[in-house]
Image (tube, grey):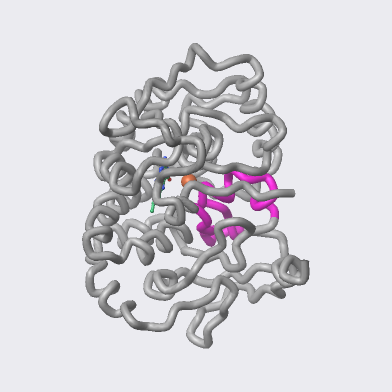
Amino acid sequence: MLRQLNQSQAPQKHGLAAGTDQRPERPDWTIDQGWDTYTAQEHAVWKTLFERQSRLLPGRACDPFVHGMSELPIGSDQIPDFRRLSDTLLKRTGWQVVAVPGLVPDEVFFEHLANRRFPAGHFIRKPQQLDYLEEPDVFHDVFGHVPLLMNPAIADYIQAYGQGGLRAQKLGVLDKLARVYWYTVEFGLVQQKDGLRIYGAGIASSATESVFSLDDTSPNRLRFDVERVMRTRYRIDDFQETYFVIGDLDELLDLARIDFAPLYERAMGQPEFEPGDVLPTDRVVTRGTGRYHAAKRRG
Ligand code: HBI
Ligand code: FE
């Protein structure tokens, strides 16, 4: 089954994906969500995706994700109204959800995050492309990302990522910072007392990767280390070969507070790692067989 591409694949597209070549209505690329214009079929696609993930995620999604979801006006029958999501989020962590046509240029994206505005695709995928996505749609962005914006650590971390992104661009090290976002906010795992759990939106919104990331023997699962991750390439078109594990979402709060400049300095000129590499210095949670990607390479 083709995999759901993720908006952080955007670094390759630098914000302008296929089909969003129209000029933005506003300088910040936001549009009205147009909630009243969604068709019954679009709401039905949401329902299919929501019910599928709701069957899969118990015991797989981390507790803060489940908790955040339960406190938000996100239901099975309809695509959520961003105004109602923002009402709840603003009170809890000061975040809002704003509608955008799709991928937006990096600096626009970072500017929104730095101001606690989460840009969410207003559109939803077609019924025939439930598992494959050219760019982030409302299910990926709202079901995958928004529940954890209710968590104070994630709320601060993603704002700091926005601020850091604007700086990283100026320093020419965006690719290193994008990897940190990728292996945490998009594809991160967290070690709970009762086992490994998903917090990455790219996994939480994907039926196939929700299972692969936790249950399959193929991927590596390594303890997160920011300098290691900064130097680790990632897959943009298939399951990850390695997932990085944090001990608690609050670890990201520490990351939000440190100055990345010395880390960029140290990473410069150092060798980079392939997605499937396991280093002698890695703290290995599970060493994968690599069988899934090896089979794909054989074709
Ligand atoms: N645009 N709408 C949207 N959503 C994203 O997640 C996004 C984007 N543009 C750029 C981007 N992500 C990435 O290039 C950055 O995370 C590096
Ligand atoms: Fe995402």
* 74 over 213 or under it: above or below: above
Image position of 252 (left or right of 132): left
- Identify the magenta region: 186-211
Residue 273 in the image: state x and y as whole percent.
Answer: 49, 77
Residue 120 in the image: state x and y as whole percent.
Answer: 43, 34
Q: Is residue 271 magenta?
A: no
Q: At 72% across and 62% down in the image, what residue appears?
A: 216
Image position of 209 (left or right of 31): right
Q: How many marks?
A: 0
Between 70 and 104, the one lying in front of the other is 104
Between 267 and 154, the one lying in front of the other is 267
Question: Which quadrant of the rendered structure holds the C terminus?
Answer: bottom right
Quadrant position of residue 91: top left
Q: At 53% across and 59% down in the image, what residue appears?
A: 189
Quadrant position of residue 33: top left
Residue 209 in the image: state x and y as whole percent.
Answer: 65, 52
Name, please, the residue furthest toward the bottom: 280
Q: Is residue 202 magenta?
A: yes
Image position of 69 (left or right of 104): right
* 70 over 221 or under it: above or below: above
Q: At 33% across and 77% down in the image, what residue appears?
A: 267
Residue 285 in the image: state x and y as whole percent.
Answer: 58, 73
Name, please, the residue furthest toward the top: 36
Q: At 23% across and 69% down in the image, what residue appears?
A: 261
Quadrant position of residue 253: bottom left
